[in-house]
Image: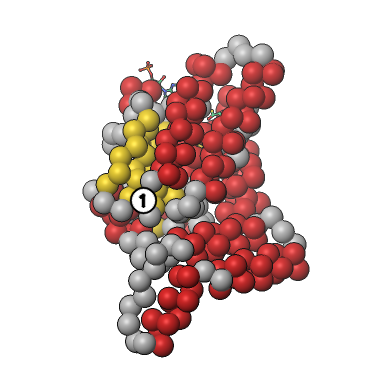
């Protein structure tokens, strides 16, 4: 139900449960974790995450499965979902959510956990858990405010309202709106950075992501550490040498 294809320089993870609008059963979440790990072992330079069909990226956690569970199972379920989505941060390559329809609840949280987000014009985002008497459990309350600010995040989480593609772009919830065919658009977008070395991209991702967690003076120290580590890579040697020799750098991710 979770498909991972290597396609050119990309790994493409597709949620395939269209009869339930790609809703996330716990089984599906575990499979997503396995496929993300597989992508991490591949030579891909970016991971693109999308949903099968034209209607939904992912309509959230499987509501039917969430009913009548014990507290311990529910807690473990939240930790599983959080851990699986957090795997994206540690991937050697950046990830892009290509949101092709509904991205509700856990589906929105999956997109939030990706490095970057693209929306097709029919994309619809929302964290409607309160309408079920719940609150988000797969990272949404933590990642959304870091991305769009606390006020907007509180409004989305408290009302559960749906945010369309244009609004998502205007509040920074997505990086761009792209036109169909989405996969080709996502690949073209990814190629804006896939020519850069993965080491530098990884250090850059970590530095920027830590900015959301740390006070300024600690973040600056992290930046000094990571930029020094980047300087020590062979890719940095190559990049600077290529500049001096007025040629295009050839990065080897070393
Ligand atoms: N779960 C299970 N099935 C779902 C589903 C979902 N989230 N969303 C849709 N489906 C199923 C529908 O039941 C229907 O199945 P059948 O009745 O045909 O068998 C099929 O997909 C098609 O859906 P609809 O017939 O409803 O299609 P419509 O076009 O009319 O409506 C919709 C589309 C997206 C507006 C609607 O399906 C909808 O409102 N879906 C629910 C959206 C939602 O509320 N998502 C948030 C889920 S809550 C936690 C873990 C997780 C979470 C919290 C805590 N812990 C472990 C502590 C997070 C929870 C969530 O994500």
Q: From the viewer's perspective, is residue 177 above or below residue 112?
A: below
Q: From the viewer's perspective, is residue 244 above or below residue 186?
A: below
The verdict on label 1 being within 8 Å of ligand 1 is: no
Q: Nearer the viewer, residue 152 or 91?
A: 91
Q: Residue at x 70, y 69 (%)?
A: 220
Q: Residue at x 60, y 62 (%)?
A: 207
Question: Could you tell me which quadrant the N terminus lies in?
Answer: top left
Q: From the viewer's perspective, is residue 107 above or below residue 214?
A: above
Structural crowding at the residue carrying mark 1, measured as other residues with C-alpha within 10 Å and reported as few (<14), some (14–19) or many (≥20):
some
The mark tally for this picture is: 1
Which of the 4 image quarters holds residue 224?
A: bottom right
* Left or right relative to 226: residue 122: left
Q: Residue at x 37, y 39 (%)?
A: 13
For ligand 1, the image quadrant comes to top left
Q: Is residue 179 visible?
A: no
Q: Secondary structure at mark 1?
A: loop
Furthest residue to the top? 68
**Colour theme:** secondary structure
Residue 22 lies, in percent from the top left, at: 39, 29
Q: Residue at x 44, y 50 (%)?
A: 95
Q: Nearer the viewer, residue 75 or 170?
A: 75
| Residue of label 1 | 44
Residue 143 lies, in percent from the top left, at: 60, 47
Residue 44 lies, in percent from the top left, at: 36, 51
Q: Is residue 34 visible?
A: yes
Residue 80 lies, in percent from the top left, at: 59, 30
């Amino acid at each position: 139900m979770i498909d991972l294809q290597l396609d050119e320089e990309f790994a493409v993870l597709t949620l395939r449960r269209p009869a339930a609008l790609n809703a996330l059963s716990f089984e599906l979440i575990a499979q997503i974790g396995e496929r993300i790990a597989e992508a991490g072992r591949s030579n891909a330079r970016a991971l693109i995450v999308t949903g099968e069909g034209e209607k939904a990226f992912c309509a959230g956690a499987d509501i039917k499965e969430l009913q009548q569970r014990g507290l311990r199972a529910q807690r473990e379920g939240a930790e599983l979902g959080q851990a699986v989505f957090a795997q994206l941060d540690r991937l050697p390559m950046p990830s892009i959510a290509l949101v092709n329809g509904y991205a509700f609840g856990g589906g929105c949280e999956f997109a939030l956990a990706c490095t970057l987000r693209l929306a097709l014009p029919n994309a619809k985002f929302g964290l409607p858990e309160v309408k079920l008497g719940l609150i988000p459990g797969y990272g949404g309350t933590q990642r959304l405010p870091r991305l769009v600010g606390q006020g907007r995040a509180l409004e989305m989480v408290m009302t559960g309202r749906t945010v369309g593609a244009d609004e998502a772009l205007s509040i920074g919830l997505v990086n761009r709106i792209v036109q169909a065919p989405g996969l080709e658009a996502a690949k073209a977008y990814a190629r804006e950075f896939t020519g850069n070395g993965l080491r530098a991209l990884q250090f850059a991702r970590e530095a920027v992501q830590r900015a959301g967690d740390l006070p300024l003076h600690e973040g600056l120290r992290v930046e000094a550490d990571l930029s020094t580590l980047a300087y020590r890579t062979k890719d940095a040697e190559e990049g600077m040498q290529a500049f001096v020799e007025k040629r295009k750098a050839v990065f080897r991710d070393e």
